[in-house]
Amino acid sequence: MKRSQPQKIGSFMQAYFDRYGLQDKIKEAMAVGCWNKVVDDKVLRRTKTVFVKNRIMYVFFHSATLRNEMMMQRENLLQRINQQLGSHVIDNIIFH
């Protein structure tokens, strides 16, 4: 059996994610964490649930008033989340 040169675990994992198409799913999971960074504490306290599916972020709020405010800021939030991630990961945000 021929031995190969040692590889860094980071490069091995990157190749694995690329091979199986998991890179997008990882970035979607990271987008959920970005929600905490792009909104202030008032919004964060009233946020019920955040998840991403098929490049769309779904955000559920305890307050209908806050939901309406966030709808007006949708484009700005999209831009800030994608900027945090370093690439265009989220296409839309749906508020409930």
Image: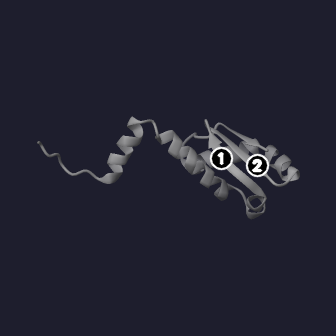
At x 62% / y 39%, what residue is drawn?
A: 53
Q: Nearer the viewer, residue 39 or 14?
A: 14
Question: Going by the image, does 13 lie left or right of 78?
Answer: left
Q: Quadrant of the C terminus?
A: top right
Q: Position of residue 90 (x, y in %)?
A: 62, 40
| Outermost residue to the right | 65
How many tags in the picture? Answer: 2
Q: Secondary structure at mark 1?
A: strand
**Nearer-the-camera pick, 52 or 83:** 52
Give the residue type that dot 2 points to. Phe
Q: Kindly identify which numbered label has been placed on residue 51.
A: 1
The x and y percentages for residue 23 are 47, 41
- Could you tell me which residue is drawn at 60 percent across and 48 percent down? 31
For label 2, the SS is: strand
Q: Which mark is residue 12?
A: none
Q: CA distance from mark 1 to mark 2?
A: 9 Å
- Amino acid marked by disc 1: Phe
Q: Look at the numbered discs 1 and 2 and tell me whether their residues touch, using CB distance below 8 Å.
A: no
Q: Which mark is residue 60?
A: 2
Quarter where residue 40 is shown: bottom right
**Where residue 86 sits in the image (x, y, percent)?**
54, 47
Q: Residue at x 73, y 59 (%)?
A: 44
In screen coordinates, is 40 left or right of 2?
right
Query: How did the renderer colour the structure?
Result: one colour
Residue drawn at x 56%, y 48% as measured from the top left: 29
Q: Residue furthest front?
A: 1
65, above or below 40, in the image: above
Residue farthest along the left direction in this orientation: 1
Q: Earlier in the sequence, mark 1 or mark 2?
A: 1
Q: Quadrant of the N terminus?
A: top left
